[in-house]
Image (tube, helix red, strand yellow):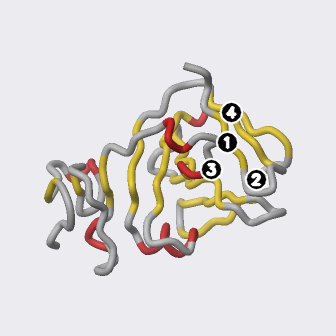
Amino acid sequence: MPPLTGHCLCRAITFELSGAPERVVHCHCESCRRSTSAPIATFVIVRRVDVRWIGDAPVVYPSSPGVRRSFCGRCGSPLAYETERRPDLIDLYACSLSDPAAVTPGSHVHVEEQLPWLDVLDDLPRYARGPQDAAPIAHGPRAKV
């Protein structure tokens, strides 16, 4: 399998991944929704050492204590989420990949913040916050929380 690649909207920033993703998740939290102006954000979580940025450097915004979000300073495309809780990993927005269909989400996280007017019709596990919370609260469409 060739390495995964991606870029921002204007292509001033591109990236290449040398390793396989750790996991792929749909996030429903308010902060991810606000940073993307979308009802859900899908992340490809990879080892930080496996990401090679090419072209312009991403602009970093400290969005909350211990959290940094990166975006293109030219076109504004969101590119990454980083947290001090997982210093060796970086979450890249799945739709920044050159081929977003090359990855498949494995779960939903932060469904306790899911918008009431959106549901994703799949059979993936749903976590109130994240997989570190132990068992998922549901599988499949609309977790009742």
Of badges 4 and 3, the one in the foreground is 3
Which label belongs to residue 94? Answer: none
Q: Which residue is drawn at 14% across and 71% down?
A: 144
Q: Position of residue 33 (x, y in %)?
A: 48, 71
Task: Tell me the distance, in whole angstroms, between the alpha carbons under discs 2 and 3.
Answer: 13 Å
Q: In this view, does 125 lie to the left or right of 18?
A: left
Query: Which quadrant of the figure contains the N terminus?
Result: top right
Q: Mark 2 points at which residue?
A: 58
Q: Do the residues labelled 2 and 4 touch (CB within 8 Å)?
A: no
18 and 102: which one is in front? 102
- The extreme top residue here reads 1
Q: Mark 1 is on which residue type?
A: Gly
Image quadrant in which you'd find residue 51:
top right
Task: Tell me the distance, in whole angstroms, between the alpha carbons under discs 1 and 2.
Answer: 13 Å
Helix, strand or loop for disc 2: loop
Q: Mark 4 is on which residue type?
A: Glu
